Image (cartoon, rainbow, N blue to C red):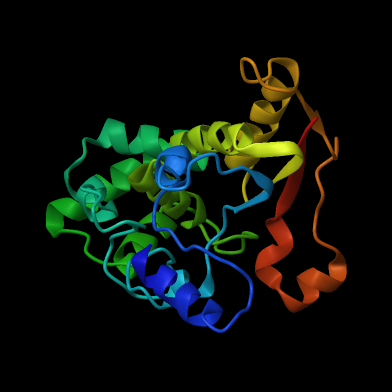
Amino acid sequence: DAAVLAIARERLKDTAARKVIIRGNFRDMTRLLKDYPDTRFDGILMDLGFSSEQLTGTGRGFSFSYDQPLDMRLDDDLKVTARNIVNSFPEEDIADILWKYGEEGRSRQVARAIVRRRQRAPIETTSELAETVAAVFPSRHARIHPATKSFQALRIYVNDELNALENGLKSAASLLNLNGRLLVISYHSLEDRIVKRSYLALCENPVSGEPGFRLVNKKVIRPMDSEVATNRRSRSAKLRVLERV
């Protein structure tokens, strides 16, 4: 995300630490480091969450809490937007996306509602989509907003997040020094399953010709109550740590 990268560059400009800021997807980590041959790391942190700036300031429609155009791309070079999906994809494909990437139990009903709504007029904004999805659910007293899973599913599909994560984990593990650690913070079950499965696979079948790996924490690490009290968005965070041995 070029906009967030610019913010990071501004915040870090006066720090004394040596740093190199590179724009790219972590699935391409090894390729992005081609100008830094033989680079290895003692620690790699992959935080899979979103910053407040991305949710509120980019105008790309990541959250139903703000009325914004339906985009959801983290990279402007990507071709498909959330608007494309809800206004042009077949009903069955929309339902499959909502089920696979959002684990939405009412995926068929939501997809049907979206198609009926777009027949009247295109769905252009987050508010229009959120209202369409919410109308499928009989109760408004659920713990989370009815559109939460649908928005998650569309964002993951648009950015190919799960495939990027799998590839990124492999790249990151291959770049660790001996005793180096890979730390991943995930925020929903789909991500956490991939991290857990990838870590276990690396421990059982390390990269060919490379040292092995071990799990630093067999049980996931969650934020303390004191952290959640000051940062509510951290409540769903899960940290897993892998070490090269």
Asked whether, in this view, residue 54 is left or right of residue 75, the answer is right
Residue 244's x, y, as percent?
75, 33
Percent position of residue 235, x then y? 72, 62
Total labels drawn? 0
Q: Between 96 and 168, which is closer to the camera in this rendering?
A: 168
| Point 34% across, 58% down: residue | 72
Q: Quadrant of the C terminus?
A: top right
Q: Position of residue 60 (x, y in %)?
A: 32, 67
The residue under the point 21% across, 35% down is 90
Which residue is farthest front?
37
Q: Left or right? Give the position of 44 relative to 223.
A: left
Q: Nearer the viewer, residue 36 or 239?
A: 36
Near-viewer residue (75 or 92): 75
In the image shown, does 39 or 163 lie closer to the viewer? 39
Using the image, determine if residue 35 lies above or below residue 209. below
Determine the image quadrant of residue 64.
Answer: bottom left
The reply to whether residue 225 is visible in this rendering is yes
Q: Is residue 193 left or right of residue 64?
A: right
- Is 11 drawn above or below residue 163 in the view shown? below
